[in-house]
Image (cartoon, helix red, strand yellow):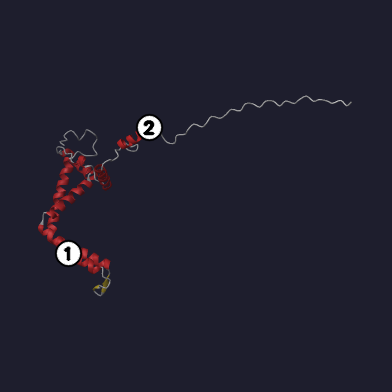
Amino acid sequence: LKSVRVCPPIFAPPLPAMAVPAPPSPVTIGVPIESSKSLEMEDLALGPMDGVKVPITRKEEVMAAVEAYQAKLGVQPWRDFVKVARPDFALARPRLEGNLTTFRGNYAVLSLVVVLASVILSPQCLLVIAALAVAWGVFARKNADENWKLSVGGVDLNARVRSSLMALVSGIILLYFEGHLFLSAIGFSAVVCAAHAVCHPAADQPAGEDEGDVIL
């Protein structure tokens, strides 16, 4: 009989228990809904991180656009422009120099309003302007014609030169008939602007030094 060698059974070591990964928690991108709503309300009230109120109504949008355009032109807020104080001869020069620089845009607008008001209130000036407008209408239609030739001293003038000559003639006519009106309006505007500059607290003065006698 052959002997049969029985080998002991080989047992593999038990595998370590594997941990089951937990399901990933939902990731919130941005801010929660409640926080976003509160931030939207704050943005409506203050604006994007600068404390500037965001316009909501149509009127506020128009006012914001006007203020931005005025700031671009160098026009200061009119609520600051209307401040006046008692005139003081000792402060007249610093006030005049500081205010003419600070409110130059406001003075330009004020002068333009005075000139326009003088033109509107003068019937003769309106007639001259109407006649010039009719002349410009006829000239523009004639100048657009490529077959129209205009020569001065044997030299043909192109459309740009003819327009420049027409503008020069119009300016001479306007100054001849209404030059006194424009000079009067400009002179009155200069007096008003100088008086305001002397009576307005100088913008470049330290706080409290030139504001003791502020009336408005």
| Label 1 secondary element | helix
Label 2, residues with CA under 10 Å away: few <14, some 14-19, many ≥20:
few
The answer to whether the residue labelled 2 contacts the one labelled 1, judged by CB atoms less than 8 Å apart, is: no
Residue 135 screen position, x and y as percent: 18, 65
What residue type is disc 1 on?
Answer: Val
Q: CA distance from mark 2 to mark 1?
A: 66 Å
Answer with left or right where residue 15 lies relative to residue 147: right
Number of numbered tags placed on the structure image: 2
Q: In this figure, which residue is indicated by the disc labeled 2?
A: 34
Q: Which of the pair 170/31 is nearer the observer?
A: 31
Residue 215 quadrant: top left
Q: Which of the pair 120/44 is nearer the observer?
A: 44
Residue in view at x 12 percent, y 57 percent: 180
Residue found at the far bottom of this picture: 154
Look at the image and tell me whether residue 118 can be seen.
yes
Check residue 194 in the rendering and tell me which mark sits there, or answer none. none
Residue 30 screen position, x and y as percent: 42, 36
Residue 48 quadrant: top left
Look at the image and tell me whether residue 172 can be seen.
no
Q: Is residue 2 above or below residue 64?
A: above
Residue 173 screen position, x and y as percent: 15, 63
Q: In this figure, which residue is indicated by the disc labeled 1?
A: 134
Viewport quadrant of the C terminus: top left
Answer with left or right where residue 29 lies relative to residue 100: right
Q: Is residue 74 above or below residue 144?
A: above
Residue 3 screen position, x and y as percent: 86, 25
| Label 2 secondary element | helix
Label 1, residues with CA under 10 Å away: few <14, some 14-19, many ≥20:
few
What residue type is disc 2 on?
Answer: Glu
Q: Is residue 163 above or below residue 59?
A: below
